[in-house]
Amino acid sequence: MNSVKDNINAVGKRTAELQQIRYAVLPWQKQAITEVTSHAAKVAASTQAAIVYLNENKGRYFVPEYRNHLTTIADSSDDMKQTVDKYLDYEKSQQKIRRLQDELELGG
């Protein structure tokens, strides 16, 4: 769980950096920052709750409360990854469109 905590702290640091540049990015990038930050916050909250649970309940790993925290961590992490992947795909598609417009001299 501490490894998860370290990883989510690193994500938190990156999302804080993204928040600082929100004013200077395109609208779709602002939306991406908002969505990723939301998923990261869910992961962080569930990770913290799981750590608190473990500290207070040594050896009780198979109870629904703890498993719910783990499920939320996994689901929110997966949602965050899928969101990032979709926005990266979008950017890649935009670059391809711009390149084709230049090659075809469409000027768009």
Image (cartoon, rainbow, N blue to C red):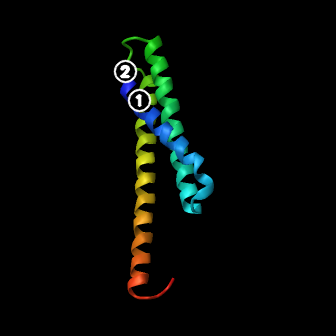
Indicate whether 100 appears above or below 27: below
The residue located at (41%, 48%) in the rendering is 81
Q: As shown in the figure, which amino acid type bears the numbered disc 2? A: Phe
Query: Could you say which is closer to the camera, residue 100 or residue 36?
Result: 100
Measuring from the top left, give residue 55's x and y in whole percent: 45, 13
Q: Nearer the viewer, mark 1 or mark 2?
A: 1
Location of residue 105 with respect to 87 vertically, above or below: below
Q: Residue at x 37, y 21 (%)?
A: 62
Q: Is residue 102 above or below residue 68?
A: below
Q: Nearer the viewer, residue 22 or 79?
A: 22
**Residue visible at 40% across and 55% down in the picture:** 85
- CA gap between label 1 and label 2 equals 23 Å
One can see residue 1 in this view: no
Are dots 1 and 2 in contact, CB under 8 Å? no
Q: Residue furthest bottom?
A: 105
Q: Nearer the viewer, residue 9 or 71?
A: 9
How packed mark 2 is, by other alpha carbons closer than 10 Å (few <14, some 14-19, many 20 or more), is few
Identified by mark 1, the residue type is Asp
List the residue tagged with mark 2: 62
Helix, strand or loop at mark 1: helix
Residue 97: x %, y % from top left: 42, 76
Secondary-structure class at tag 2: loop
Quarter of the image where the N terminus is located: top left
Q: Which residue is mark 1?
A: 6
Q: Residues within 10 Å of mark 1 (few under 14, many from 20)?
A: few
The disc at residue 20 is: none
Q: Earlier in the sequence, mark 1 or mark 2?
A: 1
**In the displayed structure, would residue 53 be above or below residue 36?**
above
Residue 101, image x, y percentages: 43, 82
What is the x, y in percent for residue 98?
Answer: 44, 76
Q: Residue at x 47, y 18 (%)?
A: 53
Q: Is residue 40 visible?
A: yes
